[in-house]
Structure formats: C-alpha cells, structure tokens
Image (cartoon, rainbow, N blue to C red):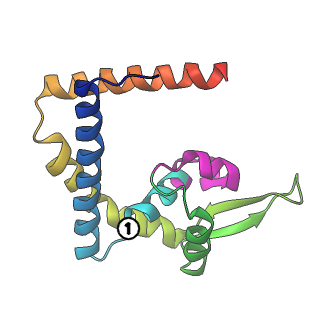
Amino acid sequence: MIRVTEKQLAAWRLFIKTHAKIIESIELDLAEQKKVPLTTYDVLIALFEAPDHRLRFGELNRKVVLSKSGLTRLIDRLERDGLIQREKSEEDRRGAYAVLTHEGEMQLRKAWPVYARGIKQYFADPLSDDEVESLIRTFEALQSRQHKEEKQS
C-alpha cells in the first residue's frame, strides 16, 4: 500500500487550495473588469506564443493548462466570438489548426494587465525573493521527475 505522510498530505492540500483561491481571485478580477476569463486567456496565450499564432488542435490541447476539460466547446465558443478561427491543414486534409485572430490578440492584450496585477497581488508580493527561488527549484524538480516518468511509460 502507498503511504502518504500527514506532512505530505498537508503540503498537497495547501498547494491545491492556494492554487484554487489565487485562480478564483484572478477570475473575479477579470470578470469585474469585463475581460476574458482565464480559460479563454489560457487558449489565446498558447496560440499567441505558437509559430504563426496557430496550433493543431492536439498540440493546443497539450499546451493549455487550465481548460483541458471542455476544450472542444470552448474552442467552438471562441470561434463564434471571433477570437480564433479554424484553418484546414494543407498537409493533412483531416487535420485542422486553431489560429489566433486579431480580435483574439486584442482581448489577450486587454486582459494581461488585470492578470499580471493578480499574479503580483495574490502570488508574488506575499513572497520574499528567497521564497520565490525556493518555489522555482521545487516546481522544476517536480516537473523534471514528471517528465522522466512520462518518458519511461
């Protein structure tokens, strides 16, 4: 049987509760300022950072962080709202790309100041520089181990 210590469980619970509260606070700020929600921002930033602002749908699914469940419905809504468009693949007739539109980029840029303020207020400001460095090391170690495990399976 796998054993999780009380301390490990406490750390896990604090991590997920803190994450959820920070995300909720940023979502509320975005809603109050009438900006796109974080799930939309997540898709738009993945496309913005991609070459030519476009990704195949499978790649997009791997890149998004917050909105994996219901991504198809979200993509449909973003297309209806003119924030992205679908583009058929020239190489693979069955494949398609999600492409960031000018309007999508504008909405992303309008949301960023509110999102950045939330990151600063709810996450960065309460931490010392040493605590930030410690978190970076911790999360890099966790990611590194995850990648190793994924490669082995």
Q: Residues within 10 Å of mark 1 (few under 14, many from 20)?
A: some
* Left or right, 123 with reference to 148: left
Residue drawn at point x = 19 percent, y = 44 percent:
123
Task: Residue 53: give x, y in percent of width and height.
Answer: 59, 55
Identify the image quadrant of residue 69: bottom right
Please give the name of the residue rendered at 56% of the width and 65% of the height, measured from the top-left corner. Answer: 70
Left or right placement of residue 5 versus residue 103 in this view: left
Q: Residue at x 48, y 64 (%)?
A: 105
Q: Is residue 18 visible?
A: yes
In terms of image quadrants, where is residue 124? top left
* Magenta highlight: main SS: helix
Q: Is residue 86 left or right of residue 115?
A: right
Answer with left or right where residue 87 lies relative to residue 72: right
The verdict on residue 86 being magenta is no
> In the rendered structure, which amino acid carries the disc numbered 1?
Pro
Q: Is residue 34 shown above or below 26?
A: below
Q: Where is residue 86? Give x, y as percent.
A: 70, 68
Residue depicted at x 55% and y 73%? 78
Q: 152 or 36, which lies in front?
A: 152
Q: Position of residue 139 (x, y in %)?
A: 35, 27
Q: Position of residue 128 (x, y in %)?
A: 10, 30
Q: In the rendered picture of this protein, how many numbered marks are placed on residues?
A: 1
Which quadrant holds the C terminus? Answer: top right
Name the residue beneath numbered marker 1: 37
- Assign a secondary structure to mark 1: loop
Q: Nearer the viewer, residue 99 or 42?
A: 42
Quarter-of-image position of residue 76:
bottom right
Tell me if I can see residue 56 in this picture: no
- Is 52 in the magenta? yes
Residue at the limit of the structure toward the bottom, as seen here: 80
Q: Which residues are magenta?
A: 47-65
In this rendering, the answer to whether 82 lies above or below 101 is below
